[in-house]
Image (cartoon, helix red, strand yellow):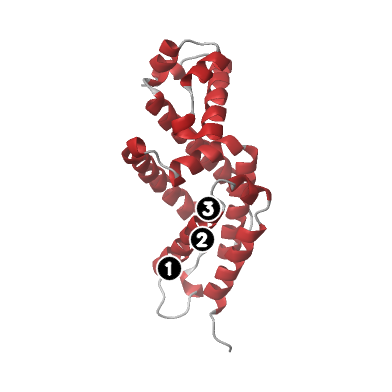
Amino acid sequence: MTSAFEKLPDEKKQRILAICIEEFAKNGYENTSTNRIIQRAGISKGLLFHYFKNKKGLFLYLVQHSIELIADKVYKKLQTFDQTDFFERIRQVSVIKMNVCLIYPNEYQILMKAILDTPKELQIEIEEINRSYYAKVQDANETYLFSYLKEEDLRPGLTKQFVIDYIMNVIDQLNRNMLQAYKGIEKELLVDPDPFLDQLNQYFDVIQYGVYRK
């Protein structure tokens, strides 16, 4: 569907892409006007829909593009890490993600709108993108995170897989809580990530050291 768009000269492709990302990030799926996009891009609606078929196809392309861009930037930075502590690496991943999202705020806004306010007509497709993305993330996490948690460091009775599943569930719930709390003002969390990082540190403290006095 987007093969014609991918074949465009890079400068033209990036200009159209930047305009589309900006409009959807600012207005969301429902309120974005393709008429405004074509006016800004200097192309016809027929050509825009030749590239993406329709508004739905365009938005799904932008979601996929945004996921891949942010994930690629995050994991490239992780490749340069020399920190070997498992929990510290997770903390650093959180910081890196926020820094990358600050560099690409419009792509971040598109992802937040897709995840938190999924248009009803796109639910199946967004879920499929998330499933596909999750599989890739799992592979990257195994390389850059999970391999740093050593079975021999765990207390008797705990398996590495159980601890990983537990920690990732905790982080997922924390992410959901924070995104819900900052819904509509997500950029504030990027500018000042301390509330998220403070809670993350509290959770990790409990996971590592328990809740009872020694």
Left or right of 101? Residue 153 is left
* 100 over 167 or under it: above or below: above
Disc 3 or 2, which lies upstream in sequence?
2
Q: Secondary structure at mark 1?
A: helix
Q: CA distance from mark 1 to mark 2?
A: 21 Å
Occupied quadrant, residue 73: top right
- Front label number (3 vs 2): 3
Left or right of 212? Residue 136 is left
- Front label number (1 vs 2): 2
**Residue at mark 3:** 179
Image quarter (top left, top right, bottom left or bottom right) of the C terminus: bottom right
Q: CA distance from mark 1 to mark 3?
A: 28 Å
Contact, CB < 8 Å: mark 1 with mark 3?
A: no
**Residue at mark 1:** 160
The disc at residue 181 is none
Disc 1 or 2, which lies upstream in sequence?
1
Query: Which residue appears farthest toward the left when viewing the image?
Result: 124
The x, y position of residue 137, in whole percent, is: 45, 48
**Residue at mark 2:** 174
Q: Residues within 10 Å of mark 1 (few under 14, many from 20)?
A: some
Residue plotted at (54% across, 28% down): 23
Q: Secondary structure at mark 3?
A: helix
